[in-house]
Each structure stands twice: as C-alpha cells, then as structure tokens.
Image (cartoon, helix red, strand yellow):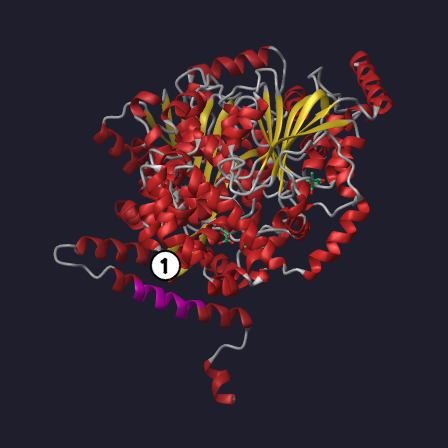
Amino acid sequence: MLGLSTVLPSDPVKLITFALCIIGLFLATIFVVAFKPKAGESTTLQAYLKFFYACFVKPHSGDGTGNQQDALESFYKAQAEVYDATRVRLLRGREDLLGLVAAQLKYRTEAGLISQRPVWVDIGGGTGHNVEQMGAFLSVPDFFRAVYIVDLSPSLCSMAEKRFARLGWKNVKVICQDARKFRLHEHEQEARKRKELILRGQIVRDLDENADAGGAELVTMSYALSMVPEFYPVIDSISSLLSPNGVVGVVDFYVQNQVEYQSRNYTGGAIDRHVMWISRVFWRTWFEIDRVNLEAARRDYLEYRFGTVLSINTRNNFFGVKLPYYIWVGCSKETGASSAKLAEIDAAATESPYLSALDLQTGPAQSDIELRSKAYESAIVNLQSSLPLPATWYQNHHWRIHYDDTLLKHTRFNNSYIYAFTWEDDRADARLLKVRPDDVILAITSAGDNILSFALEHPRRIHAVDLNPTQNHLLELKVAAFTALGYSDIWKLFGEGHHANFRDILINKLSPHMSSLAFQHWLSNGTRIFSANKNKGLYYSGGSGNALTLVGWLFRILGLSGEIKKLCAAQTLNEQREIWERSIKSILHSKILTWTVLGNEKWLWKALGVPPAQRDLIEWDHNNMDDFDPEGPFAANTPTNKKDRKKTSEKAQRKSSGHAVYEYVLNTFEPVVTTTLLSTSNHYYLLTLLGHYTPQSHPTYLSPKSHVQLSKPTAFSGLRIHTDEISEVISRMRPNTLTIVVVMDSMDWFPPGGKQAIKQIRGLNRALRVKGRVLLRSAGIEPWYLDVFGELGFSCRRVAVRVPGGCIDRVNMYASTWICTKEVSIEHEDVKASLRKNSMGELKI
Ligand SMILES: C[S@@+](CC[C@H](N)C(=O)[O-])C[C@H]1O[C@@H](n2cnc3c(N)ncnc32)[C@H](O)[C@@H]1O
Ligand SMILES: *[C@@H]1O[C@H](CO)[C@@H](O)[C@H](O)[C@H]1NC(C)=O
Ligand SMILES: *[C@@H]1O[C@H](CO)[C@@H](O)[C@H](O)[C@H]1NC(C)=O
Ligand SMILES: *[C@@H]1O[C@H](CO)[C@@H](O)[C@H](O)[C@H]1NC(C)=O
C-alpha cells in the first residue's frame, strides 16, 4: 500500500494528468506505427512527428503576455508546413460540410433567393484548405464574387497566400486578423454602401456601431469555433455578417450530455448526439492541452442564435477511438419567422384561407387556435420565448410539417418503417376516384407510392398523413429525389433498391430538399440499406423487408427458388399458370406445410401484420361464406343483424381460425397468379418474389414519363406531409374543405363498436365537403363500421368485392372496397358557428 502511494501521486488532479500522460504515450506509439513509412514515404512520418512534437511536446505558452495570437503562433509556426498533411484524418467532415453548403447555395441561387454572385467568409480558415477543396463542388473563381479567409495565425495565413497564388484564384483574399474584429464593410464595396444606407436611415440594428449589415451569402467555420477563446462575439458577428438568405456552416468537435439538449425542439433532431460520460471527460481534458475547448455552450449558442437547417452528429474513427464531431448548417433566425410567413405556411397545412398576419404581441385569438396546426402552435411558443423556430420552418420547401419527434407515439416505431412499398393498387384508386384539379386529397402515406401517383394527377393539394415518422421520411426521400435527380438515379434507388453512391447524392444533391430529421435518418440508415450487397437493398429493409426475407427463405427451403424465378419471367398468362400448377401450388397445398407453417396462428398473424380486430373480420366472413351471394343486392347501409353476428362469432371460435387465414391467403394469391401477369402488369407480387422491380413491371411513379412530370419545379407545391394520427390531422382541418380521403384499411383496426371509429367518422364528416368521398378497403366483405358511416351522414357504396377465384385488384389483399360519400353535414351548427367566428377574425384583422 505504502509503496504504491509513493509511486503514484495522491492528488486526484495529478492522478488524471498521470493517466493522460500514459494515454498520450500510447497514442504517440500508434501514430508512429500507423505512419511507418513505406518505401519513399518518409515525408509523412516526418510530418506526423512534427505535428506530434508541436501538439504534445513543445510547450506552447506564447510570450507570456496571454495574447492569443502569440499563443497560436507558438503552436502553429513549427507545423505550418505540415498542417494540411496531418489534418486529413483528424479534421473529418470538412468535405461533407462543403458539399452541404454548396448544395444549399446552388439551390438558393437557382430559386432566386440569392440574386448576385455570393461572398464567402471562412472564419479561422487557416491554410485555405477548405477553399481549395470547395473546387470539388463548384468553380470557386467563377461562382463567388469574393472569398475571405480570416485567420489570426500569420504563419498559416502565409501558407494560404502561397496556395492561392499557386492556384491563381484572384477572388480569394487572406485577412490576418482576429475574427472578432473582422468587418466585411471594410473590404467590400457593396457591404459598405448598405451599411451607410442603414446608418443614414437611422435604423440602428445593433448596439455595435461597427456591425455589418449583411453581405456574406456563406459563412463557414471548420474546427475554428472550438479554438476561439471568446466565441460569443464571433458568433454574434456572423449574425450581422450574413445576408438575409445566406447560409452558415460549422463543423467541429463537441461533447454533450443528453440532459443539455433534450428539451430543445429547434435543434433538428438528436440522432447520435449524446456522448458517453467517459468520452466527454476524456476528450475535453485531452483537447485542453492544445487549447481546444469543447465547452457545450459553443454549439448551443450557435443553435440559439440561428435557425437550424440541417444538423449531423457523428464520430471520427481516429485510430480506433471514436472522436465526436458535428456538422451544422444554419440560416438567419428571422428567415421565415415573420408572422406573415408563418401564417401563410400554416394556412396550407390546415386548408384555412390565408388572411393576414397574426398579432404576435397579443397572442393568437381563440378562433385562430381552433384551426391552427400543432406546428404553428409550437412556432408561437418558441417565438414567445425568443427561441428559434423548429428546424422544419427553416427548410427550403415546406412539405414536411413540424412534429414533436420525442413523443412516445412516434418513437415506438423504433426508427423503422413497416412498409418499404405501398400495398394498395394505385390504378384501381385512380379509376374509382377520378381525381380533378380542384380536389383536396388526404391519404395515408405508407411508402408514399400512391401519394406520388396522386401527384401525377395534379390535384390542388395532397395531405399525406402517417403516425410513423419514418414512413414520411421515405416519402421525403422520394420527393427530394424527384426534385434533384435524373431518371437513372431514381431507378437505381427505387427500382432496384440499390445505389452505390447513396451517401454522396444524399449530401450533394438531396440535402437542400429534405427536413433535418429525414436527412439525419437517411444519413444514419441509408448507406447500409442502399449500398448493401446484391440480395439486400431498400425492399429488404423495414417490416415489409422482413416479410420478403421470410418469403425468400420459405421458397428456398421448399426448393422452389428456381420455379419462382421462372414464374416472374413468364411472358404469357398460360406459361405463368402452368408453372404455378405444376410445382408451386401443389407444394403450398401440401398438408404438412399447412400444418406446420400456416396452421401456426401466432406466426401467421405476425408475418402478415394482421391486428386482432381485422382478424375477427376475416374469421367472421370465413364462417359465413356459404351464405354469401356476391351477385346479391348490396344496398347502401344494409343494416346488420346483430344477433346473427353474435351467433356466428361463437361458431367461429369453434372452427380453427388458422384455417380462415389460410383460406384468405390462398384466395389472395391463387387468383393473382392465374389472372395477372407478374412480369408485365403486377409489380406488387413481382416485388415480393424478386425484391426489386423490373423495367417492364414497376409502380406508375417509376416510369420515365412520370419522371418528366414529377421533376417539374411545381410538382410538389401542393404536398403537405403530416406526422400524426389521421383523426388529429382532420380535426385541425378547416371544415368542409377536403374532397377525397383515402384511409386504406386502417378502419379495420378499430375495435368493433368502439368510440374511436365514431370519432374518426365524425371528424371525416366535418372535414369533408358535401359530396366529398372516403375510399376505404376492408378485409371484411361488409365491415361493421359502415353502419356508423350511414348514421353519420354518409352514403356508402361497395365499388368492388372479392369473389372466390377472382381478383378485386392487382393486390387482391382485401375483400371489399368502399366509397362513402358525404351527403349532409352532421355538425351543421358547430360548423356554422366556427365559420362565423372565423369571419369575425377576418374583420378584426
Ligand atoms: C484547427 S484550425 C482549422 C483551420 C481550417 N479551418 C481547417 O479546417 O483546416 C483553427 C484555426 O482557427 C484560427 N483561429 C483561432 N482563433 C482565432 C481568432 N480569434 N481569430 C481568427 N482565427 C482564429 C487558428 O489560427 C487556426 O488556423
Ligand atoms: C419547444 O421547446 C420550448 C423550450 O423548451 C418549449 O417552451 C416549447 O413548449 C416547446 N414546443 C413544443 C411544441 O414542444
Ligand atoms: C421497438 O423496440 C422495443 C424494445 O426493443 C420493442 O419492445 C418493440 O416491440 C419495438 N417496436 C416495434 C414497432 O418494432
Ligand atoms: C435505422 O437505424 C436504427 C438504428 O440503427 C434501427 O433501429 C432501425 O431499424 C433502422 N431503420 C431501418 C428502416 O432500417
């Protein structure tokens, strides 16, 4: 005991220093080993030795005056020459940042938000490495009117000057100055003019008389924010430096604890943001040696001072240790935060007419609240607390409506979608609904395929609704892809489900068109999904992907893989039927299979994703099949005999319910194979068997003709993507506005006779215009809730029914399709009252 305590220091601070020394030695060894020169590469080793000497051995104390420039110089002078070579692995994410801001600038220029050649200020730009790297994304001498590199270290500045003399880029200027003191109007003619105008107009924007009045379209800081001792004035100066539609980009190290940011709803998502305790302590202490400060406030203040456009948390795998860094793209907090703009965006989300700005001082009036989206309410709450708006408000497109991603009802989906493809026949929908240009459609998102089909018919507005955020992320990915990519990339992504360069196109092409949450999701999941090996890909991801994998396994175990391939390639219906009859059908019919796989109820329910209420519907029909007459009259609102239903449900329990489902599955599959040709006209089943589409068989949105339509700039201007329950969304719609609602089979999931269905149908009646239609599908031939529709002002018509041996549509999963038309408003008085309130609101404003 005594011996040890004399060897080890007893003071805890000294103990930690001692531990760090050991780790330092360890890292030094790794450096040397990792860069052991191969033949003729001695320069890299020398470079790293110099770097190591300057970082960890050479005392960097400055001249003792505490002046930052001297301290910096003492640090960088010895390594200026080797700076670039040694930072490639340490300062990761710089290329990603440049790609992201370049994409933003290109979009904003094309959209007319930036009207002149942009000015770029790189604060703490060092050797000008970033400016040269930007050449990979745009032509720096042509695109920018001027580029300023501001840095306090003379030795790094002179490296930068040499670089741009060599490149011959005349528009790049190196300013050796403290970032706190840099003012654009001292260098830029136009910034000076604007400044003078403002001073003459006596509008003092800021207490700081020296402050700029905008002028830079791009301000970046890469690994510099953590090195500036006084960061508040630097961040404040960015704010006055930035022109109104300009972009800020920052990449830096950070360490943060969940408790620090979890209550904030304006940071654009927190995937991977939390850093473990040990890592937090280690990196903060470690970087202190080099005067790099990982204080959490640096990042927080940035997020507080600006609007967040995109944000990434990630790790640099630095010689086997994970070093956390972030990439953040922001914009002026005021962009889009004007009350007028907010109200305008909100009006579209709720179908309210856009009238006028809301008076934020007095707060929203009662009547407004009624018709406001939750997103709008959250924006008001944030503005009243002087916080930036949630990130969705700062996006280039207002497709996605803000939602609180921390709520349990969203997180319980575990960041995964259930459907990677939509399982409803869009052609049947189109035929039944005949969409017109003045239609206002609300539909469940699912995988978004049918939303895109609707978009091809140009209705006035489409509201896509899903409670699962990742289903909406998938739709956002598709919409962004159509906005930014050519046909061949679209086909790779969604036709084949593979794209080798997914990460590149996400960052360089898709990022300006996505919300921060969707972007984070695809950045963290997309590469694994799209760049997987040949037998995986998009359609093997998510819940439906598991089902595809299972189907694949099943056929492999049964030795049917070859036959399935032939089935998918068959060129005529006869050929297809023959393959089906000769092998697949008989094996699927065999008793053993039925008994082991299909007879096992639990497995079946899970694999098919059938909820209990829907299962009851299937069983009820199964037991009444004998009484069913498909030709018989099905008048609207046929009253159901309650006693009958009870009697048969008792009967149902006696019969095996596994059998009902087995029958259901066969009734689904057999007619599909015998009446639709997979290789040309049934992409639904082709996909489940092959795992990808083919040029002959694919959803409507994947044709070259659709691409021409959907890549037009206005193709999605009427699209709004809501993340919430249908009932929540329709309850905030202005009454009498929707004309078409597609609820798929979601009503089957409600417990029979329960309040939920009644509430939803009431809500539909309120939100729909008279003669507005609800399209629904059911696993039952005549589901119970149609009675409720009848009681609540609708007339229902069955527009398709599945008879044994026939197909209801190409999916053939549901037993019946219904259109319920709203005939009368049931809440006459309520609606009138709320309209009256609204028009009073108009007069008041
Ligand atoms: C780690 S380097 C990053 C350099 C460059 N941005 C890059 O990514 O390679 C940090 C830079 O910040 C600069 N810096 C630190 N404090 C500064 C200040 N107060 N004003 C201007 N530059 C500063 C340093 O001189 C240094 O070049
Ligand atoms: C957003 O966060 C602020 C601050 O924590 C809070 O006051 C506000 O209620 C939040 N807004 C929403 C919609 O959750
Ligand atoms: C999400 O994960 C939890 C815990 O791992 C699990 O219990 C739950 O069933 C999962 N939810 C879904 C929808 O997969
Ligand atoms: C995305 O990644 C998360 C975390 O790794 C995982 O839980 C989730 O299932 C993934 N989602 C998809 C659709 O692959």
Q: Residue 627: x and y, percent? A: 68, 45
- Kindly identify which residue carries mark 1: 556
Q: Is mark 1 within 8 Å of ligand 4?
A: no
Q: Where is residue 823 in the image (x, y as percent from the top left)?
A: 76, 22
User: Which residue is drawn at the image coordinates 51% and 14% (left, top)?
Assistant: 194
Comparing 676 with 55, the one in front is 676
Q: In which quarter of the image is residue 434?
A: top right
Residue at the far left in the pictured view: 40
Q: For the C terminus, which image quadrant?
A: top right
Q: Is residue 222 above or below residue 104?
A: below
Q: What stretch is highlighted in magenta?
A: 20-30
User: With 292 as the anchor, is 775 left or right in this view?
Assistant: right
Circle 1: element type: helix
Examine the rendered structure and indicate whether residue 167 appears above or below residue 683: above
Ligand 1: image quarter: top left
* Picture residue at 45% right of the left edge, 40% below the top: 684
Compared to residue 809, the image places residue 359 above or below, namely above
Taken as a whole, is the magenta stretch helix, strand or loop?
helix
Residue 124 visible in the current orientation = no
81 within the magenta span:
no
Q: In which quarter of the image is residue 340?
A: top right
The residue sitting at 33% across, 51% down in the picture is 563
Packing grade of label 1 (10 A; few <14, some 14-19, many >=20) is: few
Q: Which of 462 and 3 is in front in this view?
A: 462
Residue shown at the point (48%, 36%) measured from the top left: 810
Amino acid at circle 1:
Arg
